[in-house]
Each structure stands twice: as C-alpha cells, then as structure tokens.
C-alpha cells in the first residue's frame, strides 16, 4: 500500500470542448456550454437547457475512428474519444505496453440512447433487438478495452453521480496493492430521454442556466460527456513528468435517502474528512475545492454545511464547474478531476458561473471570477450520488 499513484494523461469531451485544450479555453474564458437541446430528440427542446455536445453520433464516430456504428452507443463513442486522448496525453502506445494495465470505467446511463430508439421494434428481431447487447453500463467499458487492447483488469462501476470518482479510486487501489501497474480510469454518459424525464419528474431541473450556491438556485442542468485519467505507479511512470498525483480519496455513504443528502451533511463530511486523512494533509493545506455543486436546494446546502464543519473559518476558494458542463452524471467525477488537474497545471481557479446572491445558511461565497496567481498545490474534488454515495478525490501538484 506504499505505492504512489500518478496521473500521466487526461482526456475529456463535454459541452465546453471535444478535448482538454478546448475545455481549458472555455474555462479560462468563463464560457458555459449550457444551451438549448438540439441533438437529443425530446419534447423538452426549447424548455430545458443542457450541457449537450453539439455533434451527431456519426460525427462522434468519425472522431473516435469508428466505422461500424451498429453496435456503438453515444455513451461508448464519447468514452472512446476521451480514452484515446488520455492515452495520447500520457504518451502510451497500447501496442507497445509491457505493464499490467486495466480499464476501470463508469456509467449510469449505459446504452440508453440506443434503447430509446429501438425498443418499440424489439419484437421484429435483428437488427432492432441487437440494442439489448449495448444497453448495460459495462458495454462502453468493453468497447474501450477491446479497442485499446487492455485486458489485465476490466471493470465497470455504477454508483450514480459518484461513479467515475469511484472508478478512479478503485483503479488507484489496484495500483497501490500491486495488482495493476497502470490504469485508464474515468467514466462516460450520454444525454437520454430517460434521465432528462427522470430528473424533471424529481422537479430538480432548472429551466435557466444553473447557479450553484446561489440563494435563488432551483435545480441543475443535465449534461453529457466522458473523461479519463491515466493512473500509473512509480515503476510505470519511469522518467516521465506526471500531470498530478492522486494523494487522497474516500467513499462514504450516509444511507439517508434514495435521492437526498442528509440535512447535516454527514455523508459529504465523512468522504472529505477521510480523504484528507488518507492523504496525510490537514484542511489548511487544501488550495481549492471543486465542489459537487449541482445547484439543487438540498445538495448545495448539505455540501456547504459539511465544508464548514471541516474547514471552519479557513475555507479555501471554492467553485462548482457544473455551470460549464452540466451535470454529466456517471462521468461527473472524472470530468471534474480533469478540470481540477487543469487548475493545478495552469494555476487557475475557474469561477462559479451565474452566482449572484449569498445563501443565508452558509458563511462562504464561491469564486466569481477567474483567479490566477494563487499557488494551487492540493485540490479537493467532490462527487456525491443518489443513495448517499459520496466520494472525494484529492489531486496534488508534483
């Protein structure tokens, strides 16, 4: 368990860019990707904004280098694009790889987009009922593993909105225990009518761009995307310079409610405090918090309460980056881990867009404008899921 875990590559596709460079440019310009829905076929077009990637499945396939579309879902295409960029970023050639390498991916939607198109014709047989083979969350993981040729460990995690944070955490543990030398870890989720309608039924979607930690917040905006980190042991790292080090992580569950956080923020408190303990850091060493910050009444209050319990009167700069990307569900933890690494590498804190008025219940306010010049050594990134499944990652400069 003494092995350190380094991040050597990152890949991302989301509403603010189809790669890390484009995403960084949007973040630096405080440019949101939330807009009206144009790709997803939904009755809520023009009503519910989302962090939609403005590319058709055919365009995504071309970007992913996929020629046979029959068994590809939008979720798998997004995953292939981000995974490929992460490997390129890490300068790893899958065909020349002597290290034990795994793919640990996450999803909540799985192949739902293909299911929604084909389920009415299921009884007609092929090709309509082939979609069932792509429906489960593990399908996109298998697609990535097969295309890249990494088969030492292939696993899928689905723990709602903390899914890809947990996939990163699980991959790190595999490396620390000497089971793997390196891992591609992250998650992918596409927009679907199922999730859009489901969150709308819960009455937690905002018809305007979301505004986390704002007094007037009413809900979140959904998004889609994929993000992956290449994690490596010191042995696999060799002489390369890493992008960051994963120094702490923890997962906790307050088991309070199926869709709500505990009012006292107990779950978020546990995940953050245990991640700090695992890292050996004290709260005053955290340079920035990339909050889960969904913009819902419940989440922002309970996350804020937990942050105040841990950091007291010394709360570091904090912001939510979901007003840029939307809430990408199973991909959110990895998307925000990539953004946290971009913050570290460029020594920049990206602002909490659309924030106007302080919440009465909390003592702090989020960052309102791009902050540069502040030394960022340790970034804490939160991802909290339905069922009280709360996860925290701590990423550090090298």
Image (tube, helix red, strand yellow):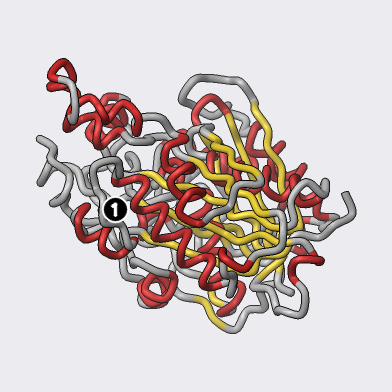
- Give left or right: position of 307 versus 76: right
Q: Is residue 307 visible?
A: no
Query: x and y percent of residue 2 in the render?
Result: 89, 54
Residue that protrudes farthest toward the top in the picture: 123
Query: x and y percent of residue 330 in the render?
Result: 46, 41
Quadrant position of residue 135: top left
Q: Quadrant of the C terminus?
A: bottom right
- Give left or right: position of 351 versus 62: right
Residue at image x 46%, y 75%?
Answer: 370
Query: Along the line of sight, which residue is nearer the eye, 303 or 63?
Result: 63
Residue that protrudes farthest toward the bottom in the picture: 373
Residue at image x 87%, y 49%?
Answer: 1
Label 1: how many residues lie within 10 Å, few (<14), some (14-19) or many (20+)?
Answer: many
- How many numbered markers are drawn? 1
* For residue 112, above or below residue 373: above
Secondary structure beneath dot 1 equals: loop
Quadrant position of residue 126: top left
Query: Along the line of sight, which residue is nearer the eye, 190 or 127?
Result: 127
Residue at image x 26%, y 29%?
Answer: 130
Query: Along the line of sight, which residue is nearer the eye, 94 or 290?
Result: 94
- Give left or right: position of 305 versus 236: left
- Give left or right: position of 126 versus 172: left
Query: Along the line of sight, which residue is nearer the eye, 185 or 382?
Result: 185
Residue at image x 62%, y 68%?
Answer: 96
Q: Name the residue under label 1.
A: 51
Query: x and y percent of residue 334 in the render?
Result: 52, 53
Q: Can residue 75 be seen in this view?
A: yes
Query: x and y percent of residue 137 in the render?
Result: 44, 34
Quadrant position of residue 381: bottom right
């Amino acid at each position: 368990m003494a092995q350190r875990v380094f991040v050597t590559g990152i890949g991302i596709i989301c509403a603010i860019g189809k790669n890390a460079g484009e995403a960084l440019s949007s973040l630096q310009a405080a440019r949101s990707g939330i807009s009206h829905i144009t790709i997803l076929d939904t009755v809520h077009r023009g009503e519910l904004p989302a962090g939609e990637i403005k590319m058709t499945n055919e365009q995504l396939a071309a970007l992913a280098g996929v020629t046979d579309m029959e068994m590809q879902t939008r979720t798998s295409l997004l995953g292939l694009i981000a995974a490929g960029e992460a490997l390129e970023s890490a300068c790893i050639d899958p065909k020349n790889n002597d290290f034990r390498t795994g793919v640990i991916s996450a999803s909540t939607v799985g192949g739902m987009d293909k299911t929604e198109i084909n389920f009415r014709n299921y009884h007609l047989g092929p090709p309509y009922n082939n979609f069932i083979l792509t429906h489960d969350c593990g399908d996109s993981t298998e697609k990535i593993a097969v295309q890249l040729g990494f088969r030492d460990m292939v696993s899928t995690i689905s723990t709602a909105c903390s899914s890809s944070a947990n996939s990163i955490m699980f991959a790190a543990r595999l490396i620390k225990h000497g089971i793997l030398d390196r891992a591609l870890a992250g998650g992918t989720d596409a927009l679907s009518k199922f999730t859009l309608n489901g969150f709308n039924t819960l009455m937690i979607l905002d018809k305007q761009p979301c505004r986390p930690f704002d007094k007037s917040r009413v809900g979140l905006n959904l998004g889609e995307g994929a993000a992956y980190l290449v994690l490596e042991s010191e042995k696999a790292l060799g002489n390369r310079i890493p992008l960051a080090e994963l120094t702490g992580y923890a997962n906790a569950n307050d088991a309070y409610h199926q869709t709500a956080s505990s009012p006292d923020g107990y779950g978020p408190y546990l995940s953050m405090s245990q991640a700090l303990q695992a890292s050996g850091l004290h709260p005053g060493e955290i340079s920035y918090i990339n909050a889960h910050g969904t913009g819902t009444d419940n989440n922002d209050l309970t996350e804020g309460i937990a942050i105040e319990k841990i950091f007291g009167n010394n709360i570091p700069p904090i912001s939510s980056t979901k007003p840029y990307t939307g809430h990408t569900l199973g991909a959110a933890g990895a998307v925000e881990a990539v953004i946290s690494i971009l913050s570290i590498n460029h020594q920049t804190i990206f602002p909490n867009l659309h924030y106007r008025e302080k919440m009465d219940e909390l003592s702090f306010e989020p960052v309102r404008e791009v902050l540069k010049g502040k030394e960022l050594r340790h970034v804490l990134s939160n991802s909290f899921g339905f069922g009280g499944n709360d996860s925290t990652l701590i990423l550090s400069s090298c």
